[in-house]
Structure formats: structure tokens, C-alpha cells
Image: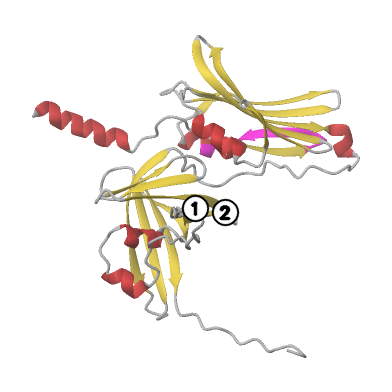
Amino acid sequence: MKNLICSIVLFSLTLGKSFGQEFFPMNLKSLIAVDNAGGKSNITPNSYFLNEKGFFMAEDLSFVNKKTNERVNFFCNVKENTEEIRVDYYSTSKDLSRFVKRAGESGLKKINETRFEHRDENTTIRIDIKRNIQLDGKTYNLLSLVVITDIAKASTGIKKSVIKFPVDYTYPLQNTTYFFDSDIKDDKSNSDEYFINTRLSKTPKYANKIVFLDDNNWKITLANKQTFVGTYNQSVENKSTVNVSFNLTIVQPKVPKGYLQPIAESGAIYNASELKKSKHNSAYYKFFFEKSYNLRFEGNDLLLSGKHYENYPTLAVPAGNGN
């Protein structure tokens, strides 16, 4: 019995922690901000984003996670008329299939299994994958974001690059597991508006679980073992308010060849009055994961808060001449 209790405690402590790979293709650009001063690019590591994932400064442009021995290095090299900015992530993850899949969805052209690339007249953007790299006696998979700029062409204004590295104020949700619950409450001042909240905790205070699988995808397992999946993205207002938007992934039903494909449905509840009467099953929770929220911290937990609107009036538009 004592061993069983110890196992349960250990499971509870580790389940909320990160597992496997910490950064994915779209995260790599979030790790730095680059500004230009006096014709020279200056790199500033995104310490907040890195620290939240357990990476702390070891040297000026090098961050290390002491628990996993993973490392992120930053470089800015200028040679003749070429400037190269690099983000090198030394990953200990053995399975890179999800990283490769996300690289293929990043908008870059797949050159081969280890390189994804986009070129324009003065800029090359690459994601490079190098397996089994030795560093300080340890073996890593090196995952790199590389941006190469032809300075001469850029300075003359020939198709200026649209690729920038602004400061990223989003929260690193990728590769984390949270326990959660959701609720809806009336807005007393507006009869057709409702407050919606989803609370996320790294400790098992709630019975449902969401795993942010990478920089785009999530999976939910409810207390009743029902599961569903979807995507998310983040944006920031005024450098402070983080907005998180969720969408359900709807699987098209299979039909025999030659038959008309029916419209796929999510199975979610969309009406607030029905939601309040519903059991807390997948139809109930799917309602909350087709919404957008503002993210804020409540102690060590995250609170996603938003609004749901119903029965908005349809505005009549005057017809034009001849209609």
C-alpha cells in the first residue's frame, strides 16, 4: 500500500510537467527579438519564454535547461554582404515526427526530410534538422531556424524582407499538460451575453485534462474518458493582453464511394440555455473549445476568460438601385 501511495504521488507531481520536446518550428522565432541599430542587427533572447520552459542563461546568447540538458544558442553573423541569424535548439527528444510535421505546415517548402525553406530576392528562411549531433559529450538532435539576408539588396530596397523578429509576448503553452474545468455565467447587465471561463491547473484539482501537443494542436481527455482534438493560436494586444483562440478539429464521416459527402458536425452545444442543462460530457466542453479567451494568471494556474453572445439582431441593409 505504501508503494502504491508513493506511485500515485509521483504520478501527480510529474503529470503536469513538460514532457519530450519543448520547442516546435513556430516557437523558434518566438525565442528572440531582433532590432536594427546603426545598420547592425542586435539579438535579444526572449528570457520570459525561455525561463517558463526551464531554460536559463548560461552565457550571453546561450540558455540551458539543467533538468534535461537541452540548450538553445543564438547567433548573428555578418560575412561580406550576407547576414545570418540562427536559433539552434539542441533537443533530447528521440521522436521528431511531430516537429517534422509542423515544419511541413509552416509555409516553408520541403526540400528534403531535413530541410524546409523559403527564398525571395534577398532573404532565405530555413528550418534545418540534424540528427545525432555531439555536444559536450552528449547526443542531441539539432533543430535550427536560419534567416539569411543579402544586406546589399536589402539596403537598396529591392523587395525588402517581410520577415521580422518582434518581441513575442505570448505564453509557451506547447508541450504542457493541464487539468481543467469550464463554466458559463449570466451577464446580469446584458441578457444575451454570458461570461465563459476555463481554468487550467498543473495539479489535478480538476478531472479533465488538456495536452498542448505542439505549437498548434491540443488533445482533451474528459473525466468520462471521452476525447476530442483541435488547434489553437495566440495573439497579443498592447504588449500585455494575451488572447488564445481554440478551434475543434472535425473529422469528415466516411461514406461509400459515389455517395454524397454529408456536412461534418462537431457535436458541440451552441446555445447557452441548452448548455446549462447539459451533462458535463464532450458536447458540453466542446462549446468552450470553439471560443477565444484572454489569458491571465491566478497564482500558479491559468484563467481563460471570455464572452459568449447570443441573439444578436440582424441589421437590414438598404437595397441599391436596380435591386
Asked if residue 46 shows in the view, the reply is no
For disc 1, the neighbor class at 10 Å (few under 14, some 14 to 19, many from 20) is: few
Residue drawn at (78%, 29%) of the image: 83
Residue under pointer 1: 257
Quarter of the picture containing the N terminus is: top left
The residue sitting at the left extreme is 1
Side of 149 relative to 313 (left or right): right
Q: Nearer the viewer, mark 2 or mark 1?
A: 1
Colour convention of the picture: secondary structure
Instruction: Please tell me whether residue 40 belongs to the stretch shown in magenta.
Output: yes
Q: Position of residue 23 (x, y in %)?
A: 52, 34
3D distance between C-alphas at marks 2 and 1: 45 Å
Query: In this view of the protein, which residue sits in the foreground, 34 or 247?
Result: 247
In the displayed structure image, the side of residue 128 where residue 320 appears, left or right: right
Q: Nearer the viewer, residue 217 or 226?
A: 226
Secondary structure at badge 2 equals: strand
* Magenta highlight range: 37-49
Residue 207, position as x, y percentages in the image: 25, 49
Q: Which residue is mark 2?
A: 236
The residue under label 1 is which amino acid type?
Lys
Q: Position of residue 229 (x, y in %)?
A: 41, 49
Horizontal placement of 300 versus 140: left or right?
A: left
Q: Secondary structure at mark 1?
A: loop
- From what the image shows, is residue 55 above or below residue 215? above
Task: Tell me if I can see residue 33 in this picture.
Answer: yes
* Number of residues whose C-alpha sits closer than 10 Å to that of mark 2, classed few (under 14), some (14–19) or many (20 or more): some
Quarter occupied by the C terminus: bottom right
Residue ranking furthest to the front: 258
Amino acid bearing label 2: Val
Q: Of marks 2 and 1, which one's residue comes earlier in the chain?
A: 2
What residue is rendered at 83% in x and 43% in y? 160
Q: Position of residue 121 (x, y in %)?
A: 84, 38
